[in-house]
Amino acid sequence: MQPFLTPSQQQIADDHVAVAEGLRRIEVELARLGPASRSCDERAGLRAELVALHALLREHFAREERDDFLGQGIPWDPGTRAAIDQLVGQHRRFLATLERLLAELDRPGAAPAPTGELQNLFANLRWHDGVETGLLRKLAAGHDGPR
């Protein structure tokens, strides 16, 4: 059987590449800012990148949660379904964390850019995308998915 992903599953795979690129751009911006950046003007580029990442993730997570991947439309085995439920819960937490960090960046006199917290979020996002990429590979190989 040839590896196969539906067009929407391929879009999810492409989204993972876009998310990785977004994280890279934010890391470059964090390095440019330095640990003591407090001015809203200094952090405008970081904020713009975080807003773009939030929008990308919101759309990406919605695509993933549709029935042809993480939704109920694929008959994943019970263990995988439990892991998928955890991944979906992570979607909500990732978005909430980004929203909170954006709100913190917008406050006058805010603390320096939250470098450590962003790096932790990015590590978790990379792990998360790796798990999902593994699930996409299973689908492409015809395991647990459409045959």
Image (cartoon, rainbow, N blue to C red):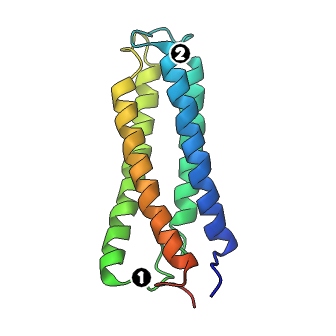
Taking the spot 45% from the left edge, 13% from the top edge, the residue there is 34
Q: Amino acid at mark 2?
A: Arg
- Residue 145 is left or right of residue 10, and the answer is left
Circle 1 packing at 10 Å, graded few (<14), some (14-19), many (20+), is: some
Which marked residue is nearer to the observer: mark 2 or mark 1? 2
Q: Under tag 2, what secondary structure?
A: helix
Would you place residue 65 above or below residue 124 in this image?
below
For the view shown, which residue lies furthest in the bottom direction?
Answer: 147
Q: Measured from the top left, where is residue 57 in percent x and y?
A: 54, 49
Q: Quadrant of residue 99?
A: top left
Image disc number at residue 98: none
The residue lying at 39 percent from left, 33 percent from top is 119
The image shows residue 44, relative to residue 60, as above or below, that is above
Q: Residue at x 59, y 21 (%)?
A: 45
124 with respect to 16 (left or right): left
| Amino acid type, callout 1 | Trp
Q: Residue at x 38, y 42 (%)?
A: 123
Instruction: Please tell me the numbered disc located at residue 32.
Output: 2
Q: Residues within 10 Å of mark 2 (few under 14, many from 20)?
A: some
Residue 59 horizontal/vertical position (percent): 59, 54
For mark 1, give the secondary structure. Answer: loop
Q: Quadrant of the C terminus?
A: bottom right
Residue at the limit of the structure toward the right, as seen here: 7
The residue labelled by disc 1 is: 76
Q: CA distance from mark 2 to mark 1?
A: 44 Å
Residue 44: x %, y % from top left = 58, 18
State which quadrant residue 98 falls in.
top left
Foreground pick, 124 / 107: 124
Give the mark nearer the N terminus: 2 vs 1: 2
- In the displayed structure, would residue 123 be above or below residue 27? below
User: Which of the image's four quarters has the N terminus?
Assistant: bottom right
